Amino acid sequence: MNSPEKVFFAVLISATIPAGAHGQSSADSAAIRQTALDYVQGWYAGDGAQMERAVHPELAKRIVQTDARGRSRLMQQSALTLINGTRMAEGRQTPPDRQTRNIRILDIFGNSASVRAEMSGWVDYMHVAKWNGQWRIVNVLWELKDQ
């Protein structure tokens, strides 16, 4: 069992590790950002190939929704569902002046990264992994914005 002192000490140590100490480079940061942009821009453009470049074939995109009785349900989309939805040009319905593309890399550690992407109607929290030398989105947990 960890005492509060040990937990605090571990946090201080991890906070002092210099950027790049775990194998990531500025090229990795740029590739992670581009992967997130391919996801966002592919959606808005209705470009299934661009979306497919961004996501791992076994992607899990999930949202927690609450039904009328107040019960939570976990709704899920696969990579294929997302790619096909992109190809159906659902994203093109968003007027260009409302197409938000705010991407922020939250953390990178080795071959893993966390990214926040704010789009017009929702926020996506992405887990991105370096897979066969390419950065791909493997998990997305998203939340709708209040309209």
Image (cartoon, rainbow, N blue to C red):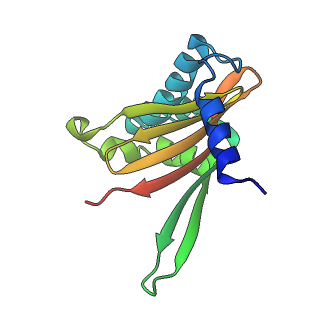
Return the residue found at the far bottom: 69
Q: Quadrant of residue 95?
A: top left
Return the residue found at the far front: 5
Decide which of 44, 117 is in the foreground and name it: 117
Decide which of 63, 23 is in the foreground and name it: 23
User: Can you say which quadrant of the picture contains the C terminus?
Assistant: bottom left
What residue is at 29 percent from the left and 60 percent from the top? 146
Return the residue found at the far left: 97
Instruction: Give the number of marks.
Output: 0
Whole-percent x, y for residue 33 in the image: 50, 24
Whether 3 is drawn above or below 109: the answer is below
Whether 36 is drawn above or below 143: the answer is above
Left or right: residue 122 versus residue 38 is: left
Whole-percent x, y for residue 113 in the image: 61, 33
Left or right: residue 14 versus residue 68 is: right
The answer to whether residue 59 shows anywhere in this view is no
Whole-percent x, y for residue 89 in the image: 41, 43
What residue is at 65 percent from the left and 52 percent from the top? 4
What residue is at 64 percent from the left and 26 percent from the top? 135
User: Can you say which quadrant of the picture contains the N terminus?
Assistant: bottom right
The answer to whether residue 133 shows anywhere in this view is yes
Left or right: residue 39 versus residue 15 is: left
Whether 138 is drawn above or below 134: the answer is below
Whole-percent x, y for residue 77 in the image: 59, 55
What residue is at 38 percent from the left and 51 percent from the top? 122
